[in-house]
Image (cartoon, rainbow, N blue to C red):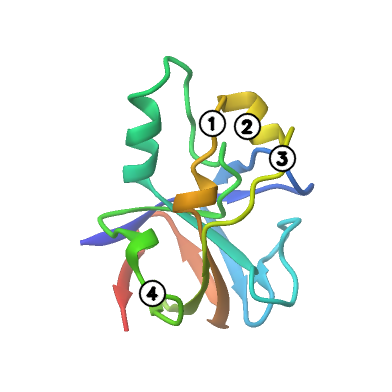
Amino acid sequence: MAEVVSINISSSKGAVKNPSECGILIKDGGLSGDAHSADGHRQLSLLACESYDEMRSLTTRKLPYGIFAENITTVGISLHTLPVGTKLKVGDCEIIITQIGKECHNGCEIFKAVGKCVMPSRGVFAAVLVGGKVKIGDEIKII
């Protein structure tokens, strides 16, 4: 079963996000209280636990969830292999994948903290179709 393992929020862009037990997804807006929450196609970012495992095998640094600035950390679903346009049910919420990967600008705080970033190849971005509460342990299903 695929599920949410961490909800991560930051009040400033480009910063490591802080884990939270739950959050509120806003239709057409993203994660409430997060600096990246806005209109557009990158309202929400997701990263799979499996990508963390890969990075952990390359470094001795601690890599807490949120260090790659993702809003939702998942387990049991290979997010970066899903095509753009895939709809996911996350708890009672619905999101649609809008972008896979992103250009990583030089000198970002995440790269400085970790030494490498997985978001350019493994980060997934989505728009919120149906808002609501999202929490650790929520099941993730492909619709």
User: SS of the residue at dot 3?
Assistant: loop
Distance from disc 3 to disc 4, alpha carbons, whole Å, reads: 27 Å
Is residue 130 visible in the rendered image? The answer is no
Q: Are marks 2 and 1 in contact (CB under 8 Å)?
A: yes
Label 1 is placed on what type of residue? Lys
Q: Earlier in the sequence, mark 3 or mark 4?
A: 3
Judging depth in this view, the residue of 123 and 18 nearest the camera is 123
Decide: is 112 above or below 137: above
Q: Earlier in the sequence, mark 3 or mark 2?
A: 3
The residue mark sitting in front, 3 or 2, is 2
- Tally the numbered discs: 4
Q: Earlier in the sequence, mark 2 or mark 4?
A: 4
Q: Earlier in the sequence, mark 3 or mark 1?
A: 3
Report which residue position mark 2 lands on: 111
Distance from disc 3 to disc 1, alpha carbons, whole Å, reads: 15 Å
x and y, in percent, of residue 104 in the image:
65, 46
Going by the picture, which residue comes out furthest to the top?
Answer: 60
Position of residue 107 in the picture relative to residue 143 (left or right): right
x and y, in percent, of residue 134 in the image:
49, 65
Label 3 is placed on what type of residue? Ala
Write the residue at 31% across / 44% down.
50
Position of residue 60 in the picture relative to residue 45 (left or right): left
Report which residue position mark 3 lands on: 15
Any mark on residue 83, and which?
Answer: 4
Judging depth in this view, the residue of 134 and 55 nearest the camera is 55
Any mark on residue 116, and which?
Answer: 1
x and y, in percent, of residue 76 in the image:
25, 55
Is residue 133 visible in the rendered image? The answer is yes
Q: Earlier in the sequence, mark 2 or mark 1?
A: 2
Quadrant location of the N terminus in the rendered image: bottom left
Distance from disc 2 to disc 1, alpha carbons, whole Å, reads: 5 Å
